[in-house]
Every structure is written in structure tokens, then in C-alpha cells.
Image (tube, rainbow, N blue to C red):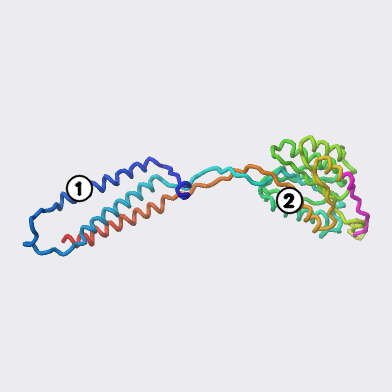
Amino acid sequence: MQLFKSIEFANPFFLWFLLLIPAMIAWYIWRQRKLYGYLNVSTAKAFTVPVKSVVPKLRLLEIVLRSLALAALIIALARPQSSLSWQDTTTEGIDIIIASDISGSMLAADFQPNRLEAGKKIAIDFIKNRPNDRIGLVIFSGESFTQCPLTIDHSVLINLYNDIHYGMINDGTAIGMGLATAVNRLKDSEAKSKVVILLTDGSNNMGSIPPITAAQIAKQFGVRVYTVGVGTNGYAPFPVQTPMGIQYQQALVDIDEPTLQKIADITGGQYFRATNNNKLKDIYDQIDKLEKAKIDVTQYHKKTEMFLPLAILALVLLGLEFIVKNTVLKGALT
């Protein structure tokens, strides 16, 4: 029964012609009686007992094949097709902006191959695991800009994410500007849950908007911020330009954890510290579990034409009727 519920007809008017089939059968029966008739006798003793003939049954087969062929042809003309509909379903999803630090310190090699590339790879895995979310990307260093606005087209987002690299903008760490840009992308969102994942490895030293001010703005627009401090505890190898090329020198990891913690507290989010690749992946997994909101998703179902098998069936049945009529029945009547 479920199958018939999913079928509709492009030309339903033709279905009225199905009423002709009972009339055709009735006319055929009346015609057969007229052509061949019957004789009433008081006794059949004077007649030779006739051999039972299959001709009447074959004549019945003829009208059955013709009726089925006509029915299949009429239904084919009505053009049955799988239903075209928009189906509203409910699924999990939110609006997320990933705000990523791409300053020079993100090239430190305490992550493999460095903080920036490790962050990109793990964030892309996070994006792939949330196909129903609208996700965007903001990058910041000495200033900030939107690399990708909120989108459900994650293939585009991932390509743009792969393209980010150190040197795209002036060096520095404008945490407040990065957060403010992310909030600006979410402020007009109608999603029930709006989230920023802010990832940095330093302290705010650039930009015109202090991080706490940006956090207060985020709170006003109902944006929750998860802050992630990236960097090992103690010292880490940082790349330094020397006359001999890029060399790595040990430098103290300086993450402004109190500010990142306060941003998370103000906005109702959480602060995390990632000291290696696995820890950063675990943090994204935790955020993935924490952020589950119900949203409506509309799914589109395509039409599928179904008339061709019926048209072929009608031709096959007509062919069978022709064969029966011009071979078996013709031989039986001669």
C-alpha cells in the first residue's frame, strides 16, 4: 500500500477510459453469443458425443489479453510517476563560525606538522561530521576577515579552509577583532543555537576591539563562544628567519588563558587547552557532543517516470493476443 501512496499521475484524465474495459468485455460476450448461438434439444442420444474443445477457453484468453493490454496502455497514457514533494524533517544542526588564528606563532612545531596545519585538518574533520550545520570561517592575525560565510555547502568551505596560510594578512594576534567578525556573521542568524569556536595560541596585541568587549557583544546576540588555547605547556619550537634560512628556536608558550576563560564564561561556552593533535581532536569531539540543536530540514524528492514498463507490457499483451488469434484460434476454426 505504501507504494501506491508514493505514485501520482501526470495525466489522470486518461484513467476514466478504464471504464471502457467492462463495456468492451460485455460487448464481446454478447457478440460471441450472437455469432455462435446455441440449440435446445430434448435429448442428445441421437447425436455423437462431441469431443471437448479448448476453443471457448482460448476465445476467453483472447479478450483477457486484450483487456489487460488496454488497461496497461491507458495507465501508461496517464503517466504514473513517483511523487514530487518537499518533505519536512527534523534533524540536528546549528550555525557555527570557526575563528582561527593564522599568526606566525601558529607555525610552531609542537603540533604535527605545525599548529596551523594540525588545526586545519582537525577542523575539517569536524566539519565533515556535521553535514546538517551551516558553518563559516573567520581568520585573524593582525586583523581579521571572513574567509567563508555561513554555508551548508561544506565542499566549498573545506576548499577555502585548505587555502588559508600564514602571511595572508599582517602578523599579530587580534583576538577581539577575530571574535567580533565572527559574531557579526552570526548576529542575523535565526538558528536556535549560534556558536563560535575561537582558536588561538597567543594574547591579544592588535586590533581596535578588546576581547572582553567582543565577548559582551556576542552575549547580546545570543552567541556562545568555545575558546581553545593551542600550544604545549612550557616551551615549544618556533620558526625563526635567519641568514641560514628558517630555523627553530625554543620559546615560551604564551597563551592568555584568563582572557579566553572569561570570554567563554561571559557567553556561556567553555574554555579548552589543546597541547597536541590528539587533545585538539578530543576538544572538537567534545564541542560536537555539546552542541546539538533541533532544526527543520527540507528534503527534495525527484520525479521518476513509470509509464515505459506499462507501455512495453501493453505491446507484449497485444502481441500475445495477435499470436493466439492468428495461430491457435485460426487453426481451431478451420
Label located before the other in sequence (1 or 2): 1
Q: Residue 86 sits in which quadrant?
A: top right
In the image, taking residue 132 as reference, residue 105 lies left or right, namely: right
Residue in the picture at 29% in, 44% down: 20
> Residue 10 location in percent, x, y?
43, 43
- In terms of depth relative to the viewer, which is nearer, 195 or 270? 270
Q: Amino acid at mark 1?
A: Trp
> Residue 23 at x, y = what percent?
26, 44
The residue that mark 1 highlights is 30
Q: Which mark is residue 289?
A: 2
Horizontally, residue 101 falls left or right of residue 234, namely left
Classify residue 47 as left or right of residue 75.
left
> Residue placed farthest to the left in the image?
46
The C terminus - image quarter: bottom left
- Category of crowding for the residue at label 2, using alpha-carbon neighbours closer than 10 angstroms: few (below 14), some (14–19), many (at least 20): few
Q: What amino acid does circle 2 point to?
A: Lys
Residue 101 can be seen in this image = no
Tell me whether circle 1 and circle 2 mark residues in contact (CB < 8 Å). Answer: no
Range of magenta residues = 248-259
Give percent across and percent down for residue 278: 80, 59
> Which residue is depicted at the point 26% across and 48% down?
25
Distance Cα–Cα, label 1 vs label 2: 75 Å
Magenta run includes residue 97? no
Whether 252 is among the magenta residues is yes
Element carrying mark 1: helix
Is 285 above or below relative to 207? Answer: below
Q: Secondary structure at mark 2?
A: helix
User: Which residue: 67% across, 43% down?
Assistant: 294
Q: Residue 81: image x %, image y %?
A: 45, 47
The reply to whether residue 4 is visible in this rendering is yes
